[in-house]
Image (spheres, rainbow, N blue to C red):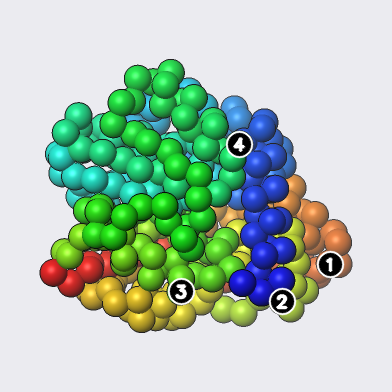
Amino acid sequence: MTEEKEELRKIVREGYGAIASGGFSCCGPAASSCCGPSLAEDISSKIGYSEDELSSIPEGANLGLGCGNPVALASLAEGETVLDLGSGAGLDCFLAANRVGEKGKVIGVDMTPEMVEKARRNAREGGYANVEFRLGEIENLPVADASVDVVISNCVINLSPDKPRVFQEAFRALKPGGRLMVSDIVLEGELPRAVLDSAAAYVGCISGAASREDYLGMIGEAGFAEVEVLEESVFPIDCLANDPTVQAVVAALHLSEEELNRALAAVKSAKIRAVKPA
């Protein structure tokens, strides 16, 4: 891995470690009027989580970090094994566990020790015996070949400095016929160069995102078939515009209102499905 990629990985790990230790943001390590702890459920409801789902998980599992609800579209069945890439505090893992039941299993992988510790604590307090959290990188998954039925991920792959490798690893971990279901940030339009070069914007899920075309292309190149966008929507702009991470980027980079609006308009939330050929 290049020095630049490793530095980006360090920035992301430290940023999300801070979130796990008490900071909140919809997509960055800071308190936010939009995505603070008292309103994490509000932003989650805006991006596809039902009230019943949010009330069914352990307290503290929802940090308001997602950009969609991959579990809702994954068509999970009882007894399946699910792998969550970048599992955070465990929100999607617990929802998946409720669907696959006692005969099923959910594995969450996250590279941030603080997040893994928090997720494990949530699992214990919630009595989830069918959920396991592992410390590891999504570019080098700590799971066996062809061992899971479904791979999910929520607003995480955009943070990886080596996205093709992530999809290759997901393909490796899936059983033949297994499914990939991700919610992630993609771009439709160009970002200002200052934003692309900003580390803070990277942690904030802005500058690390790939174009929609490139993102789908990477999935196909990893070997997946039937790659399709099930849903696509504008990511809640009010949240992005008010998030302190974004505000810090704007202030530090001296972005004009036009540049900021262009950057925010380019950010889309996409729900993408693909299949590993049987």
Above-or-below relation of 222 to 179: below
Secondary structure of the residue carrying numbered label 4: helix
Q: Is residue 242 left or right of residue 228?
A: right
N-terminal-most mark, 3 or 1: 3
| Left or right relative to 20: residue 252 | right
Q: Earlier in the sequence, mark 4 or mark 1?
A: 4
Q: Amino acid at mark 2?
A: Pro
In the shown orientation, is residue 61 left or right of residue 202? left
Q: Earlier in the sequence, mark 3 or mark 4?
A: 4
Residue 114 is labelled as 4
Is residue 202 positioned above or below 26 on the image?
below
Residue positioned 15% across, 40% down in the render: 79
- Residue type at mark 1 is Leu
- Percent x, y of residue 274: 27, 67
- Residue behind mark 3: 164
Q: Which mark is residue 95?
A: none
Front tag of 4 and 2: 4
Marks 3 & 4, CB-CB < 8 Å contact: no
Q: On the image, numbered disc 2 is attached to which residue?
A: 192
**Residue position marked by numbered label 1 in the rendering:** 253
Labels 4 and 2 touching (C-beta < 8 A): no
Distance from label 3 to label 4 (Cα)? 26 Å
